[in-house]
Image: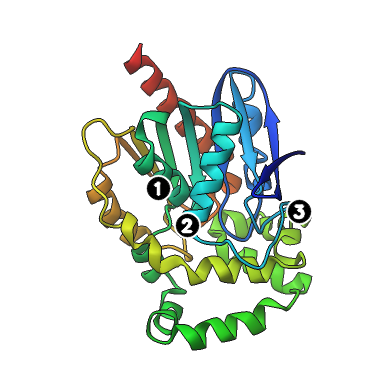
């Protein structure tokens, strides 16, 4: 893996292929490894990048910095340092939120967006864990105190496996993808619990994405949802789509929060077709 310095902190990433750039961004709690079956399908025609976000994978895990604003700053700095703009962005969950927020700030630097299970305040609140936001919104001091205590813990492998199983739909659980060692390692790594809880603490600021309405010149959007997503609500995702008005939307049966691992061929085909359509439209 290569290293990018962001404010003195090492951010790890993989880089493959040659051509127009695509940056792939994972969800909170995992790493670039969720794209392992997707990247090879693009590296023969594109230059692909997949980051380990701050606090996850092999990147630095500082005490602070897990806000949407700082993550968008990281993405912006990475894009500028590698002179990638204009580029295509593919994100999952908070990676989708980062991609959308970056495009809101710099629409001229984005060719197209693929938002997989986009994280917003509304999509999380309507998911199975949404009730936990009540404490964060109504008693933030208590919520942060609990998070600080839990965040010091290093999860055992069994809990990591169960955390992953919760994120998969019926396809992933049947294939026992939650037992994949490199995925489990994301949850059991030292400092990982703190990072994930710190991201959770900032979810209320993701509400700005719920009300954003793209203008006619905004980069084209494709959304992909796993219909068995328990982390984020696909039903709330339909409401979000009514505002985002994506050029293409896909709803995948049997998939949960990590459809790129459950249906990598289908996810890759959707992304490839969408980017190809956008390229043809520009030409």
Q: Nearer the viewer, residue 259 or 68?
A: 68
Q: Looking at the rendering, in which quadrant would you find the N terminus? A: top right
Tell me which residue sits at (63%, 81%) in the image.
148
Tell me which residue sits at (45%, 73%) in the image.
128
In the rendered view, does 110 fall on the left or right side of 59? left
SS for callout 1: helix
Locate residue 279, reporting x and y percent. 40, 18
Is any part of residue 203 visible from this angle?
Answer: yes
Locate residue 96, reporting x and y percent. 46, 48
Q: Gap in Å between the C-alphas at discs 2 and 3?
A: 26 Å
Q: Looking at the rendering, in which quadrant would you find the C terminus? A: top left
Q: Which residue is mark 2?
A: 68
The reply to whether the C-beta atoms of the residues labelled 2 and 1 are less than 8 Å apart is yes
Tell me which residue sits at (56%, 40%) in the image.
77
SS for callout 3: helix
Tell me which residue sits at (33%, 55%) in the image.
209
């Amino acid at each position: 893996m290569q290293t990018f310095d962001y404010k003195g902190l090492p951010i790890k990433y993989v880089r493959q292929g040659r051509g127009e750039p695509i940056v792939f961004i994972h969800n909170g709690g995992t790493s670039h490894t969720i794209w392992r079956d997707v990247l090879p399908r693009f590296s023969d025609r594109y230059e692909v990048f997949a980051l380990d976000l701050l606090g996850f994978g092999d990147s630095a895990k500082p005490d602070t910095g897990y806000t949407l604003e700082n993550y968008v700053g990281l993405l912006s700095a990475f894009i500028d340092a590698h002179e990638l703009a204009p580029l295509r962005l593919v994100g999952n969950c908070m990676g989708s939120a980062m991609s959308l927020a970056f495009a809101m700030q710099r629409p001229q630097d984005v060719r197209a967006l693929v938002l997989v299970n986009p994280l917003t305040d509304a999509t999380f609140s309507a998911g199975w864990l949404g009730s936990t936001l009540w404490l964060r919104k109504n008693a933030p001091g208590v919520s942060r105190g609990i998070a600080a205590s839990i965040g010091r813990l290093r999860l055992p492998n069994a809990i990591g496996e169960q955390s992953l199983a919760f994120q998969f739909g019926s396809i992933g659980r049947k294939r026992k993808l939650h037992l994949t060692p490199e995925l489990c390692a994301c949850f059991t790594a030292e400092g990982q619990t703190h990072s994930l809880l710190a991201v959770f603490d900032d979810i209320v600021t993701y509400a700005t994405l719920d009300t954003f309405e793209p203008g006619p010149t905004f980069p084209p959007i494709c959304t992909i949802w796993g219909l068995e997503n328990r982390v984020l609500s696909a039903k709330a995702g339909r409401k979000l789509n009514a505002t985002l008005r994506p050029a293409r939307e896909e709803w995948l049966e049997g998939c949960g929060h990590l459809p790129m691992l459950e249906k990598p061929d289908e996810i890759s085909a959707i992304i490839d077709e969408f980017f190809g359509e956008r390229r043809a439209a520009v030409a």
